[in-house]
Image: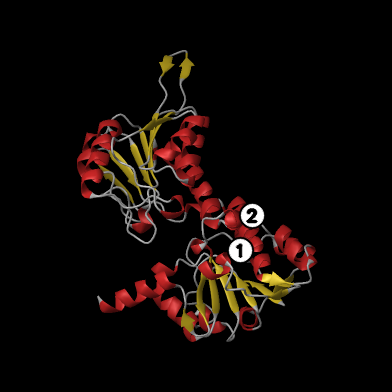
Amino acid sequence: MNIAIPREVVDDERRVAMVPDMAKRLAGEGLTVRVEKDAGVAAGYPNEAYRAAGAELVNDTASLWRDADVVLKIHMPTEHPTLGKHEASAMREGASLVGLLQPFRHHEAVQKLAEGNITSFSLDALPRITRAQSMDVLSSMSTVAGYKAVLVGASHLGRFFPMLITAAGTIRPSQVFVLGVGVAGLQAIATARRLGAVVEAFDVRPGVKEQVESLGARFLVAEQVEAEGEGGYAKELSQEQHQRELQLIQEHIRNADVVITTALIPGKPAPVLVTEEMVRAMKPGSVIVDLAAEMGGNCVLTQKGVEVTECGVTILGPLNLPATMPTHASQMYAKNISTFLQHLLKEGELNLDFEDEITASTCITREGKIVHEATRSAIDGGKGS
């Protein structure tokens, strides 16, 4: 069976879906691993490393896509700059695709996959169950994003993070405020604490309090605000709860030097947690790093991929932070996607059991149809708007 690893063509993407160590493992199980030439170079994985791992290097992009039984990639297929066609159209009918496809955001590409009779699986649809933890790409990439967000914030802040005792006197530590304590938030807390900052954190799920405090941060609680949804994700608050949440944030954000926002609600725009009034109350020179920028932002003034300054406060809306740390991000991604692929295989061939929760939950298109109910509903709803 041919496993294809194409070079990602999305702007500023430096990751690759398969690293040599994982390619070696798959090749050792009798799979033919075909890697597009230079696919891993930007991530620090040269062509020679793939050859040494037993993978085949492919110069002809069209044949890589056309001859693949399974394509492993990061992003949803898109228009290819050199093929002159959509990547979904470059796949043979009946082939399979695995990636971090984000189908809610790419309706046209989902329809192309269905029209091409591609069986596609999106790892952002994994169920939150124990068996799926080793495949959890979202957690892996959130770890990278949370870590890098603190470094980005520190690099834009005109002061030290740690307390320093110097010949010029004692310098007080910076104050970091983390909004949203999922995987990215916890990693942001841990990184800020390692750099010596004093950290406060807020989340609508009181169950994360112990994790926050174990990292040496202070957990803030808004009375009568609790919203933990299915799978441990945060769910949308009522208007009254949201107002109490905003009041608490406003009380604490004015003292922060760096604010890291990470709050997301699956399938919905990011909740607004930082208002313009809050930004105006912050200290000049402080920094907001909004990890929810791609979904609209937790700060009302955030602009996707743009640095904004308002009342002396720098507001950053970075996109795709994992791509800025491509070596380890690719290593983690490759481990997750390889584990998922092995879940689909039996004796070196695809064995798709749609009675299995992991397989069924992640399948987006199959047999010419969009079979993922939430994606189909989102697309049908978009047609009617």
Answer yes or no: is residue 243 visible: yes
Is residue 79 placed above or below 264 in the rendered structure? Answer: below
* Mark 2, other Cα within 10 Å: few <14 / some 14–19 / many ≥20: many
For the C terminus, the quadrant is bottom left
Which residue is the extreme one toward the front?
355
Its colouring scheme is secondary structure
Between 11 and 295, the one nearer to me in the picture: 295
Q: Position of residue 325 (x, y in %)?
A: 55, 50
Quadrant assignment, res 304: bottom left
Q: Secondary structure at mark 1?
A: loop
- The residue that appears at 48% across and 40% down in the rendered structure is 186
Answer yes or no: is residue 35 visible: no
Which mark identifies residue 39?
none
Q: Position of residue 353 (x, y in %)?
A: 62, 73
For the N terminus, the quadrant is bottom right
- The residue that appears at 47% across and 36% down in the rendered structure is 189
Q: Secondary structure at mark 2?
A: helix
Question: Which amino acid does the dot numbered 2 rest on?
Answer: Gln
**Distance from Cα at disc 2 to Cα at disc 1:** 8 Å
Is residue 300 placed above or below 258 in the rendered structure? Answer: below
Is residue 273 placed above or below 384 in the rendered structure? Answer: above
User: Is label 2 in contact with label 1 (beta carbons under 8 Å)?
Assistant: no
Quadrant assignment, res 99: bottom right
Question: Which amino acid does the dot numbered 1 rest on?
Answer: Ala
Which mark identifies residue 17?
1
Between 48 and 259, the one nearer to me in the picture: 259
Residue occupied by mark 2: 331
Q: Is residue 38 left or right of residue 199?
A: right
